[in-house]
Every structure is written in C-alpha cells, then in structure tokens.
Image (cartoon, rainbow, N blue to C red):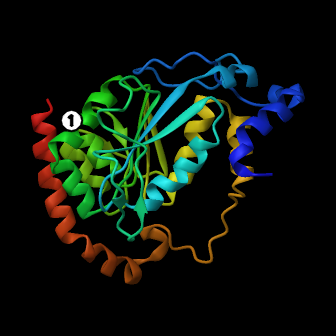
Amino acid sequence: MDRRDFTGLAAAALVAGPAFLASSRTLSAETTPREQAPDMTTRQPMSWQDMARRNDQILMLVYPEMTALDLVGPQYAFACTLGAKVHLVGKTRDPVMTDTKFAILPTMTFDEAPADVAVLFVPGGTTGTLAAIGDAATLDFVADRGARATWVTSVCTGSLVLAAAGLLRGYKATSHWAARDLLVAGGAEPVDARVVIDRNRVTGAGVSAGLDFSLTLVAMMRDEAYAKSVQLLAEYAPEPPFRAGTPAEAGPVITAPLAAMFTDFRRDAATVVASAAGRSR
C-alpha cells in the first residue's frame, strides 16, 4: 500500500468493519473547547464518515535551524489523519535550512495561513529556536494563531517558543530534558514526562518524543483505533539498542558532557523567554 493513500484506503476498509470501531475509545467530531481537558471516556464515537467530513487545518511552523525530526515525525502522523490538511508555515516560501543541514520547503507564509485552526504546532532547536523567539513576526504569528487554535502544541524546545508567546502561562508542559526547567521563565509548570496534556496544550519532550506526541494527539482528534492504525503503518514499535534516552538512563558519565554543551543555550534561552513572555502579557 502506498502510504500517501493511507487515509482514503483505511477509511474504505474500516468503514466495512464496524466491530473495529466499536472496540476503540473515541472522541466526538465536535471541537474540544480550548480550556476544557479532553475526556476520552465520555465522548460519543466518531465514525469514519464523520472523520472524512472534517476540515481540520494543521499549521506546523518551520524556521531556520529548527530540528528537522521534531517536525518530520509529527508531520507523518498528521498527514495520515483523515479529514486533516497539513500546512508547513514559514515567514516566506523560501526553503528553510534545518540544524542538520537539509532544507524544508514551506507550503505557505504567515500571511497566507488560515486564522482559525485545529492545531498549531511548533518544533524546537537550539540557536534557531532562540532566533525564532527573538523574531517579532514569528512570535506574533505564534501568539495570534495559538490564541484561537483548538490545540496548541510543540515538541522539544518548541515549548519555549510557546512560552515566550505567552501561550503556556498557567499550564503544565514539557520540553527537551536540557531545557525543561526553563519553561518557568514563561509562566509554565515543567513536567518530566514524554507527553504532557493540560487542557488544550499538548507538549512533547525531546526530538523522538514527537512520535509519541503526534499519536497521542491523533487519538484525541480522531480516536484511539485510528491512532493505532497510524502507528502500525509507521511500524512504530521501538526497541532501542541502548537504554540511554534520558539522563537517568544514560547516567552521569554520558549526560555530563552533553549537559555542558547546553550551558550557553540555557543562559540565553532563560533571558529571551522571560523577556518575550513579559512583553506578551
């Protein structure tokens, strides 16, 4: 099966199998209010026909020197979501060079992006993220779309951008382990978790957590069975060769030199996030 045709083919196959849908925890087709936590136990099921009729606009911010994997994993899951349209939004339509030195081509500009969207997503990075926070046009765009989005989301240090835009004040959130505590500068409550959901704010930890984050969000936007099908299509069944994905697992010998690499970033990030968040009040 061509993965590009997944949404159409999956809908056709699963509409014919109602028992599959009956076994899943589901959400209704209604939009979740911005300040209300999703309740996956009481909402009415969403049929595949209802999913196909959706027109959920998903805006994924792209900016220079962002971390590509922060975006690419979630983009895959969102692109497989029936009834959703994914937009890669940049300041211009020029190719955006990522921090691992390959370019991503935006599909629309800030001015072209729809005003009211289902999802605003922000990826992270290091120096590129600091530059994005310091760019008035980028931060204004994030603040504006985030104020009206049904879901306000990020992966890795993208949550620092949300915090700087004033979108995490009073919310629990996560980020990359090297920057998580810096969320306090934007009024957020840092949580050490792979994915954190607080009302309509959904944040993922560092880089690879984008897969966990996006499957979680797809389950809330559609239903658990649909998210499981996307996971199966991606064959996401991680068996890492090492248990070293967190500081606790990696231990101090591995963690210490990596943490030292973030010293300048942490100093600068704390300053720019607090300054920007203060202006956004």
Residue 246 in view in this figure? yes
- Seen in the image, is 15 located left or right of residue 247? right
Q: In which image quadrant can residue 163 be found?
A: top left
- Which residue appears at 56% of the width and 73% of the height? 243
Q: Position of residue 10 (x, y in %)?
A: 78, 38
Q: Which quarter shows the C terminus?
A: top left
Q: Position of residue 258 (x, y in %)?
A: 33, 76
- Seen in the image, is 252 located left or right of residue 5? left
Q: Position of residue 120 (x, y in %)?
A: 40, 36
Q: Which residue is mark 1?
A: 140
For the residue pair 226 and 38, the one nearer the viewer reads as 226
Up-down relation of residue 253 to residue 212 (above or below): below
Up-down relation of residue 246 to residue 50 (above or below): below
Up-down relation of residue 216 to residue 259 (above or below): above
- Which residue appears at 63% of the width and 35% of the height? 219
Q: Residues within 10 Å of mark 1 (few under 14, many from 20)?
A: some
Amino acid on which the number 1 mark rests in the picture:
Asp
